[in-house]
């Protein structure tokens, strides 16, 4: 698949300056290659795309990242965009959309950047599934609705919520939803 992506990018006049086959390889590669835009697969070994995106933005907040995935699920798209992705391209729909998405991401990075993703401590870095669950909670979905949408058990949703609460240092879904609604900030500032 990497060769196909490189071919698509070459047709769109992009130079591929580095390729990582594992999420843990991405940060060192970004630091050494200094790309204008990064393409991340949502499902990578070692470190998934959302966690990798979070780490990239922690060290390179202005670097646009496009998420590429086999999934076209709306919740996956919402999770990626909520985590700070500049764009989201589903491989199953049309890989030909990758080039235009990168052009848009680079242009956005040079003009009006999307707000930086929430700053989180390393222990608060969410997994891909936790990000989707948190986004669903912020939208007001019940645990059962989340379980149905993700095709998982209610116990699995509760497990993810427990991890989210622990990582955020909160004790309930209302506090987690408020955290998400504030863009990942623990509290507001009064003037």
Image (cartoon, rainbow, N blue to C red):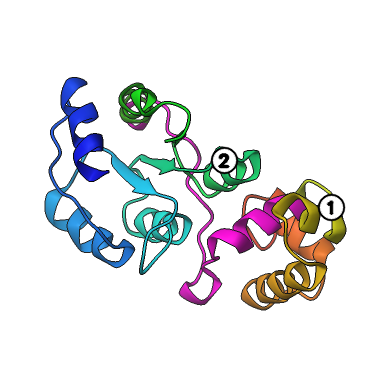
Which picture quadrant has residue 165? Answer: bottom right
First along the sequence among labels 1 and 2: 2
In the rendered image, the quadrant that contains the N terminus is top left
> In the image, 87: left or right of 9?
right
- Residue 3 position, x and y percent, is 19, 40
The residue shown at (65%, 44%) is 75
> In the image, 88: left or right of 77?
left
Q: Is 119 inside the magenta-drawn segment?
A: yes
Q: Is 34 inside the magenta-drawn segment?
A: no
Cβ–Cβ under 8 Å for marks 1 and 2? no
The residue shown at (75%, 67%) is 157
Residue assigned mark 1: 145
Q: Name the foreground residue: 10 vs 130.
A: 10
From this view, report whether residue 83 is shown above or below residue 103.
Answer: below
- Residue 42 position, x and y percent, is 44, 51
Residue 124: in sight, yes or no? yes
Mark 1 vs mark 2, CA separation in Å? 18 Å
> In the image, 6: left or right of 174?
left
Label 1 SS: helix
The residue shown at (50%, 50%) is 117
- Residue 168 position, x and y percent, is 65, 71
Q: How many marks?
A: 2
User: Crowdedness of circle 2 by 10 Å Cα count: few (<14), some, many (20+)?
Assistant: many
The residue shown at (39%, 53%) is 57
- Residue 88 position, x and y percent, is 47, 36
Residue assigned mark 2: 77
User: Crowdedness of circle 1 by 10 Å Cα count: few (<14), some, many (20+)?
Assistant: some
Residue 188: in sight, yes or no? no
Label 2 SS: helix
Query: Which range of residues does the magenta coloring cover?
Result: 109-137
Which picture quadrant has residue 179? Answer: bottom right
């Amino acid at each position: 698949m990497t060769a196909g992506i490189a071919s698509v990018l070459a047709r769109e006049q992009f130079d591929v300056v580095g390729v990582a086959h594992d999420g843990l390889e991405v940060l060192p590669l970004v630091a050494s290659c200094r790309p204008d835009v990064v393409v991340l697969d949502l499902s990578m070994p070692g470190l998934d795309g959302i966690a990798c995106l979070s780490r990239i933005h922690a060290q390179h907040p202005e670097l646009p990242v496009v998420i590429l995935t086999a999934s076209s699920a709306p919740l996956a798209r919402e999770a990626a965009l909520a985590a700070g992705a500049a764009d989201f391209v589903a491989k199953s729909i049309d890989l030909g959309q990758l080039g235009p998405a990168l052009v848009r991401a680079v242009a956005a990075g040079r003009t009006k950047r999307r707000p930086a993703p929430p700053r989180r401590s390393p222990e608060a870095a969410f997994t891909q599934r936790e990000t989707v669950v948190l986004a669903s909670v912020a939208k007001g979905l019940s645990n059962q609705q989340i379980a149905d949408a993700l095709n998982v058990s209610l116990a699995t949703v509760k497990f993810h919520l427990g991890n989210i609460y622990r990582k955020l240092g909160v004790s309930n879904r209302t506090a987690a939803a408020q955290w998400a609604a504030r863009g990942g900030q623990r509290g507001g500032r009064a003037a």
